Image (cartoon, helix red, strand yellow):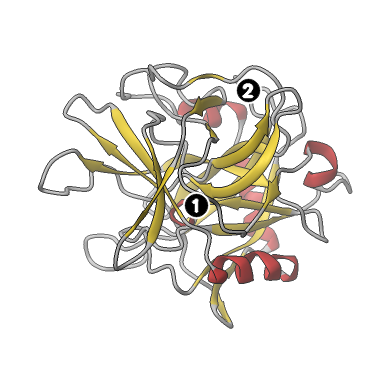
Amino acid sequence: MIWKALSTSGVILAAALVASPAQAAAGQVVTKVSEPDRAAALAHWTPERMKAVGDGDLPPAEQISKPYEGTAPGVGRLFTSTSTGEDHSCTATVVPSATRDVVLTAGHCVNGGLDRWDDPIKILNVVFVPGYDHGSRPHGVFVARAFAWSDTYSGPMSGLDDDAVIALDPVDGRHVQDVAGAQDISFDEVGSPVGQTTLGYPVSALDRGEALLSCVRPATLKVNSVMSAWETDCDLAGGSSGGPWLRGFDPITGRGTIFGVTSRGTMNGDLVTTDLSAAKLTDAVRALYVSADDL
């Protein structure tokens, strides 16, 4: 997640993640991952490395969001590394596709932006673990073969179209959608405010990113001259980026319909997240989703 200080300075307190694009498709920026790099990603992400993402100083435990109890088909933890040598995690969700290999997350989870010398920060070692829970990997570890975002997304400093799709390799011949399920997604207009459930793996003092948390709060659509974004007063910390915002959520089945993913958050002086935002899904993101089967 990208956090903003709750002040007039607008200082970015946490940088985003991503990779250097290897190929540009029409209207999209696509990164293909070579077979050797996929093997390196699977070797890199040992159970110990996954747990270590939560080491160090962490923001306070959430008070509004709570550990999620039950099933959440298709939702999992996304692990990445940067070319600067850091390991990170986000949240991602399997969405219906013809290949049955596609997950949706935030653009900044796979777009590293630029370093202080304006050189691209590459995103490496991208793997997805559906149903991750305290080191348990019940459906296996799925490595990315490609990822993409719309060319309308200009990078981590922007919230517009902060969405990305990732195509995953099957594990032992089994596609991620077949073993982990999926959440529906819709690009229809949604009335504001809307009741919704946000899911994510925040790396906070509550559980160090080791468990899925949920926040059940209404979201309101805010519109300005640059973009339209959903906002809610959820307090999920960093690591929940890319997590689904689900309307019509059924706590029995754990299913709903995605209308956005966590993009940005605002922190107060105590490093507590006070609100989250999700960019409204646009036609550009719809085109990105439709073309994900070609990755």
List x then y, in percent, for residue 140. 75, 35
Quarter containing the C terminus: bottom right
Above or below, 154 against 51 in this view is below
Quarter containing the N terminus: top left
- For disc 1, the marked residue is 106
| SS label for mark 1 | loop
List x then y, in percent, for residue 242. 51, 45
List x then y, in percent, for residue 241. 46, 42
Q: Nearer the viewer, residue 171 or 97?
A: 97
| Left or right of 106, for residue 115 | left
Q: Looking at the image, can residue 171 be seen?
A: no
| Left or right of 158, for residue 146 | right
Amino acid type, residue under disc 2 in the picture: Asp
List x then y, in percent, for residue 219. 45, 40
| SS label for mark 2 | loop
Q: Looking at the image, can residue 35 be seen?
A: yes
- For disc 2, the marked residue is 133
Q: Nearer the viewer, residue 39 or 53?
A: 53
Q: Residue furthest bottom?
A: 26
Distance (Cα) linking label 1 and label 2: 21 Å
Amino acid type, residue under disc 1 in the picture: Ala
Mark 2 surroundings within 10 Å by alpha-carbon count, few (fewer than 14), some (14 through 19), many (20 or more) = some
Q: Please identify the quarter of the rendering in which residue 26 is found.
A: bottom right
